[in-house]
Amino acid sequence: MPDLKAIKEHMEIIGADGVHIGTVDHVESNRIKLTKKDSGAGSHKGHHHYIPTELVAEIEGNKVRLSANANVAVSFEEERDSKPL
């Protein structure tokens, strides 16, 4: 696994197929938090999504490439409400 410390804010996250998945907000333990602008629409709007770091295959310049294609990787996303409980 690549050095996760190399993942920085605003890096693009792409699937193994090169399709855009999201933009890094920051890394929280074993998850990459995506920016809200990549939160989607409808019930997903206004929520941060998270990608497990186990899916990181490599870091290429300003891109984090995952080991799964985009359509598979998004099925691993976790969603958290951005509003405090």
Image (cartoon, rainbow, N blue to C red):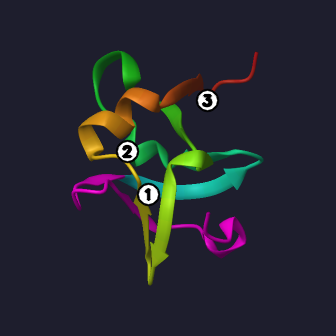
| Quarter of the rendering occupied by the N terminus | bottom right
Q: Measuring 60% from the left and 49% from the top, which residue is drawn there?
A: 53
Q: Pointer 1: what residue?
A: 23
What label sits on residue 82 in the rendered view?
3
Few, some or many C-alpha atoms within 10 Å of disc 3 (few <14, some 14-19, many ≥20)? few
Q: Are marks 2 and 1 in contact (CB under 8 Å)?
A: yes
What label sits on residue 11 in the rendered view?
none
Residue 9, image quadrant: bottom right
Few, some or many C-alpha atoms within 10 Å of disc 2 (few <14, some 14-19, many ≥20)? some
Q: Measuring 51% from the left and 35% from the top, which residue is drawn there?
A: 49
Q: Is residue 52 left or right of residue 73?
A: right
Give the residues drawn in magenta, as a range: 1-21
Question: Which secondary structure lies at badge 2?
Answer: helix
Kind of residue at disc 3: Ser
What is the CA distance from the residue labelled 2 to the residue labelled 3?
Answer: 13 Å
Q: Which circle's residue, 2 or 3, is located before the other in the chain?
A: 2
What is the CA distance from the residue labelled 2 to the residue labelled 1?
Answer: 7 Å
Q: Pointer 2: what residue?
A: 38
x, y (%) of residue 24? 52, 58
